[in-house]
Image (tube, rainbow, N blue to C red):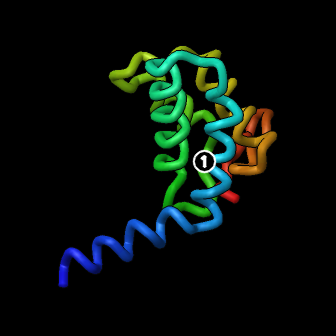
Amino acid sequence: TQAQLLSLLKTFSREHTYAKRFERFMSKHGARKQKGEKKRLRALALKILHIADGQQTVRRDDVLQNLLADQSAYKKKEIEGMIKAMNSDGLITSTQGQHSRINIE
């Protein structure tokens, strides 16, 4: 039935290795932050992943411009910090420079 399929899908998504890595990343980087700030950081990280989702690679500048135009009014420093943190934890691969790219790992 539909309820059973939904239950299986939720279980699968919780058990996925990338989801587990993402949750570890969020607990590490959300520690000692207030509830609202944690939600904002989580939303930013998910938006970065969604922009790059389904593509082999995406230009870092495109991600930055997309998020700067977002209604959540993210600051450039905030976006760059999240990209750097996600890169250092191995969630994404991000290069810097004139032709910088972001890949989901």
Which amino acid does the dot numbered 1 rest on?
Glu
Look at 50% across and 57% down and name the residue there: 53
Q: Is residue 54 above or below residue 93?
A: below
Looking at the image, which residue sits at the far bottom? 1
**Which of the two residues, 40 or 79, is positioned nearer the viewer here?**
40
Q: Is residue 22 above or below residue 4?
A: above
Q: Could you tell me how many numbered marks the image carries?
A: 1
Look at 26% across and 79% down and name the residue there: 4
Left or right: residue 5 compared with residue 51: left
Left or right: residue 77 compared with residue 71: right
Mark 1 — residue? 23
| Residue 36 placement (x, y as % from top left) | 44, 19
Look at 70% across and 49% down and name the residue there: 92
Q: Quadrant of residue 19?
A: bottom right
Q: Quadrant of residue 2?
A: bottom left
| Residue 54 placement (x, y as % from top left) | 49, 63
Look at 42% across and 16% down and name the residue there: 73
| Residue 23 placement (x, y as % from top left) | 60, 47
For the C terminus, the quadrant is: bottom right
